[in-house]
Image (tube, coloured by chain):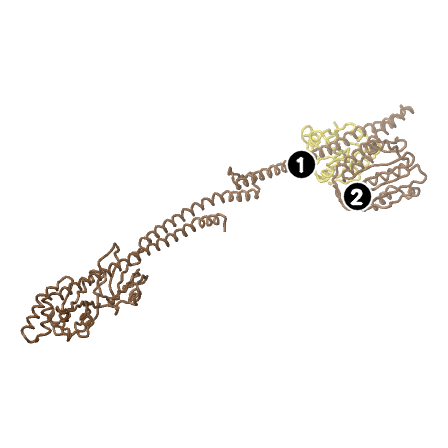
Amino acid sequence: MKLRSRITLLFALLAIVPVIIVGFLAYYTGRQSIENVEINHLVSTNLMKSSELTRWIEGNQLRIEELAQRPLVVQNSALMATSDPAGPAYDNARLDLENDHLRPRITPTGGFIEISVISPDSGIVLASSDDTQEGKYHSNQRFYLEGKTHTYTQGVFYSLPLQQTTMVVSTPVKDRQGKLVAVLAGRLDLSDLSLIMSAQSGLRLTEKTYLVNKSNFFVTEPSSGGGYALKKTVRTEGVQAGLSGSDGVGFYEDYLKVPVIGAYKWLPQYNMCLITEVDQAEAYSRIDSMAATMITIVSLLALIVVAASFLLARTITQPLARLVAGAAAIGRGNLDQRVGTAAKDEIGELSRAFDRMAMELKETTVSLDELEQRIRERTAQLEAANRELEAFSYSVSHDLRAPLRAIDGYTRILQEEYEQLLDTEGKRVCSVISESARKMSGLIDDLLAFSRLGRSAINPGKLDMEALANSVFQDLTTAQSRKRIDFQVDAAPPVMGDLSLLRQVWVNLISNAIKFSSRRRRAVIRVHGENTEGEVVYSVQDNGVGFDMQYADKLFGVFQRLHSVREFEGNGVGLALVQRVIHRHGGRVWAEGQIGKGATFYFSLPRQGVI
Amino acid sequence: MKDMFAVDVLLVEDNLQDAELTIRSLKKHKLANNVIVVEDGAEALDFIFCKGKYAERDIKHPPRVIFLDLKLPLVSGLEVLRAIKQDTRTKSIPVVVVTSSREDPDVSAAYELGANSYVVKPVDFESFTDSIGKLGLYWLIINQPPK
């Protein structure tokens, strides 16, 4: 992964992860507190509703008790219980009860739907606000049996005689002696209950409170309506829990399959369960909207962080990228490339160090170029000088020889054509002139040879020096002259060098040895060679006239001679030529000698080829 | 001026002493019947190609041999040699390059341009006379020129 992506990712993670964690914690805590609030609210709603229910029931109990204590109700009830149902007194009593006491208690809104006076002996309905109920038996009904002794409320149940679900409040009617004369039972209007239950207690739109009886039927209409009361069963988690006799809170789906938070409360005295529920969606709506806001904020934050870290990464990686590009450019040979920045950080320092390197490299390269240029110029100069020297040599040989030829030629003409006019001395002078001209011609030839040998290119090859020395000796001597020369090559290791030039070296040294030992009756010449450190040293030793060591440094100079021409002929070029050739091979020359005892001439050549 | 139409030897030589010694050498060998000496390359060309003061000459009567020094004023010996050997009318004339030096860098150039011979003038007069005599003998008598 590229450095830029890594930095961006790292910063994004560092910035976003804590925000997400904090956000999640906040959300979780908020949800938790909202749940607590909701639960408290639902539980207290349940308490409130149950107490409202109790109050409603107690109110109705009071009302029916009040009815039971009316003297006329007691009197008429007693009368009906004791008189003949076929007699007029019975009917009067009944009508009196129904018209004056029972029916007035039936109100269109709330309260009782129907009130009956039931015989304490048979359980038969003696009188009722509803005529259709007269004559019906309630002898085994709970409200009847309980109602004989005390005021009793029978929770919602299905009444076979009434063919419907109902709720009944009953109370005994007793005369002054405390004798039970009748049971007064009032059927309650359950829609009243629905109103009480469904009355909104708070601001929550989806909150609903309803009662469910033991048989899982809705007792009251839930606020969503739909005629569920006493027609539909409900078996939600909360309802089952409540019907099992416990109070509590739960999270579950309600009868409409909507997730809710529900509080359930078992009402044992009425055999009913009180349920208050609120939709989770509404309960959590605030925290959810908070979560949505938070997600938006986190997303925005993430975007900002990514953008910022991308920019940051770029400020880091851009100089690096420039460095890389610069390095590549310099690698391609563009030494003028600069990557330096004024940045005070490490990358800035690196880039400046890089520039310094490129600069130094350029200086080095430039100086190398200059050096090469200088070498080319110097070579050109040398070549020019060499050409000039050649031209000079040519001129010398050509132009110096022409007058010499004239001198010799005209002297000869003088000698030949004017012979009679010249005396002996005249003829001797003429021959001296001729001799001098020829000698000068020889000097010119030697000088030119020296110049030519010094200039010609070296063609190195491996040379068998022993064979070379021997062959040179053979060339320089005749069978006759060899008789008086003891010539021997001890050892001469092979070496790298130019054949014709080194041959000339041997020629000059060996011929010198022969020449300077020519006065000996027996000339001894020894050629020797040995490998020393880094070079091979050769020597030519003779037992000739030798030389004075104080003049040793003059031996190798051009035209330098230690002997007169009358003693030994020669132009003084031979050793100078030897020195020149050896120097050009990277070697050295030197000599040892003693007057009358002979001389040894040494030369060395590098062992690693030639320079 | 000698007969310009029947020239045996054209001697191109700027050194008059050399020219004189050459002529003497030829005479000694009885070969210098008709020798013309010109002192520079330009005059040599004029003579050979019948121009300038040699305009009356007929190019159809070339010298039997040319002794040519390479080191000449005005036009060098090599230029003269090239001109002679490039022209079909003159290229069959034998040209002997006679020079003072073995060092001459133009020896090989002279042969490449078609020189028929290359001779170094000896300083020693005896050798010189001998060489010139042999040259004259060979080119004027032994050698058979084209018809």
Q: What residue type is labelled 1?
A: Ile
The one nearer the camera, A88 or A442, is: A88
The residue pinned by badge 1 equals: A375
Q: What residue type is labelled 2?
A: Glu
The one nearer the camera, A29 or B14, is: A29
Left/right of residue A223 with respect to residue A439 in the rendered view? left
> Percent position (x, y) of residue A519?
93, 36
> Percent position (x, y) of residue A85?
8, 75
Farthest residue in the right direction? Answer: A521
Which chain is assigned brown? Answer: A
Any part of residue B29 in sight: no
Q: How dense is the environment of label 1, judged by Cα within 10 Å: few (below 14), some, or many (20 and up)? A: few
Any part of residue A331 in sight: yes
The residue pinned by badge 2 equals: A533
Left/right of residue A27 with respect to residue A590 in the rendered view? left
- Picture disc at residue A330: none
Q: In which quarter of the image is residue A517?
A: top right
